[in-house]
Image (spheres, rainbow, N blue to C red):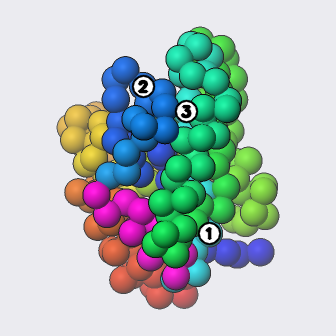
Amino acid sequence: MNMKLIILDRDGVINQDSDAYIKSPDEWIPLPGSLEAIAKLNRAGYTVAVATNQSGLARGYFDLKTLSAMHRKMEVLLSELGGQVDAVFYCPHGPKDGCVCRKPSPGMLHEIGERFQTNLKKAFFIGDTISDMKAATSAGVKPVLVRTGKGEKTELLLDENNFSHVPVYNDLLSAVEDILSSATNAYA
């Protein structure tokens, strides 16, 4: 099945990021325009999935109940705009755990492709870090960088990481608007 699929990183793309981790629903604050962007994707017939590293679980900064509460907050705020995320995939492991799901490994993206039984080559992955770009490329997904979160610093690293071809946008809303305006070409 060939569905229109967009995969989003969470922290720094949908919501504000913090070097001290997002540890509670109160700290989960949507970036301006991000929830509207997801609702626009929904209205345009896209399936939206989130792929997020959440090593704060492994580090003991928050538990699964708290992570679920953060995602519930996102769902409630999205529903108020007529939007939704179709699935949230997260890696609960720390950087040294050697798992296949933690970005830059493509495991979560492959899981999303399997879950929705779709070809990832036509999907987009919008992120703000080099590990997001690496995961997208490894999974055969089209990488897109936003300047929010860690994106401005990441943009400076694109050339040296062989990602000079990656499109860069100021934020999720501008990326989504461009993808939607050229969607007829992308899915022709």
Q: Quadrant of residue 180?
A: bottom left
Residue 25 horizontal/vertical position (percent): 49, 38
Res. 25 visible in picture:
yes
Amino acid residing under circle 3: Asn
Single out the mark in the foreground, 2 or 1: 2
* Mark 1 residue crowding within 10 angstroms, few (<14) / some (14–19) / many (20+): many
Residue 151 is situated, as x and y percent measured from the top left of the image, at: 28, 42
Instruction: Look at the image and give the residue range highlighted in magenta.
Output: 32-43
In the rendered structure, the answer to whether residue 144 lies left or right of residue 63 reads: left
Judged from the image, the secondary structure of the residue bearing numbered disc 2 is loop
Mark before the other along the chain sequence, 1 or 3: 1
Give the label, 3 or 2, closer to the camera: 2
Q: Is residue 147 above or below residue 186?
A: above
Determine whether label 1 and label 3 are within 8 Å by CB. no
Q: Please identify the quadrant where the N terminus is shown.
A: bottom right
Residue 120 occupies which quadrant of the picture? bottom right
